[in-house]
Structures are given as C-alpha cells and as structure tokens.
Image (cartoon, rainbow, N blue to C red):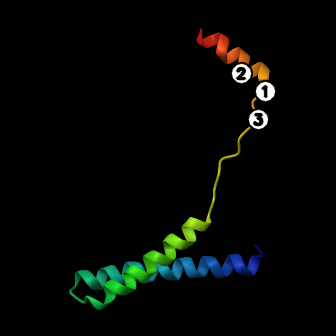
Amino acid sequence: MNRRQGLWEMALFFAAAVAGIYGFGRTFQGDTVWLGVSAVSLMVLAKQMARIQDHLPSRPVSHTQTATRMRERE
C-alpha cells in the first residue's frame, strides 16, 4: 500500500466514523432516515476492519525449547 492510498483509507475511515456517530445521534432524536446512514457507515467500517490482518509476530520454537517444556510438565 502506498502513502496516498493509506491517507485515502484513513480519511474514509474517519468520515465513516463521523457519519455513523452523527447518524446515531440524529436517529435517537427521532429522524429515522439517518438510521440508514449509520448502517451504511458501519458496513464501511466493518469492511475496512476486515481487510486489516494484524497478527502478533511469533518466534519459531526450537526443538530443544519444546523438549525442555515437556520435561517441566512431567
């Protein structure tokens, strides 16, 4: 991902978040049209969050560490 695409996605994320919060506020005031805006913004946020695959880095476990752990359990 290049810098421009990252900035675009960040701006889209913030715009969807603001629209969702504003839409929920308007919905609670009785304007039901904004419920659709909130639903669409939640779908956009969910779609973007599904793209993010954040995994913790894992270290390869050596066979000696595994054998030591097995002996400690016994």
Which quarter shows the N terminus? bottom right
- Tell me the CA gap for discs 1 and 3: 6 Å
Give coordinates of residue 31: x percent, y percent. 25, 90
Q: Is residue 13 above or below residue 72?
A: below
Q: Secondary structure at mark 2?
A: helix
Quadrant housing residue 48: bottom right
Type of residue at label 2? Thr
Q: Residues within 10 Å of mark 2 (few under 14, many from 20)?
A: few
Q: Is residue 32 left or right of residue 11?
A: left
Q: Residue furthest top?
A: 74
Name the residue that disc number 2 marks.
66
Q: Is residue 47 left or right of residue 72?
A: left
Give coordinates of residue 5: x percent, y percent. 71, 79
Name the residue that disc number 3 marks.
60
Name the residue that disc number 1 marks.
62
Give coordinates of residue 37: x percent, y percent. 39, 86
| Count of numbered tags | 3
Mark on residue 10? none
Type of residue at label 3? Pro
Labels 3 and 2 touching (C-beta < 8 A): no
- Tell me the CA gap for discs 3 and 2: 11 Å
Q: Secondary structure at mark 3?
A: loop
Instruction: Pick whichever, 31 or 46, lies toward us.
Output: 46
Task: Tell which circle, 3 or 2, labels the residue nearer the N-terminal end.
Answer: 3
Q: Secondary structure at mark 1?
A: loop
Type of residue at label 1? Ser
Q: At 30% from the left edge and 81% from the top edge, which residue is drawn?
A: 25
Labels 2 and 1 touching (C-beta < 8 A): yes
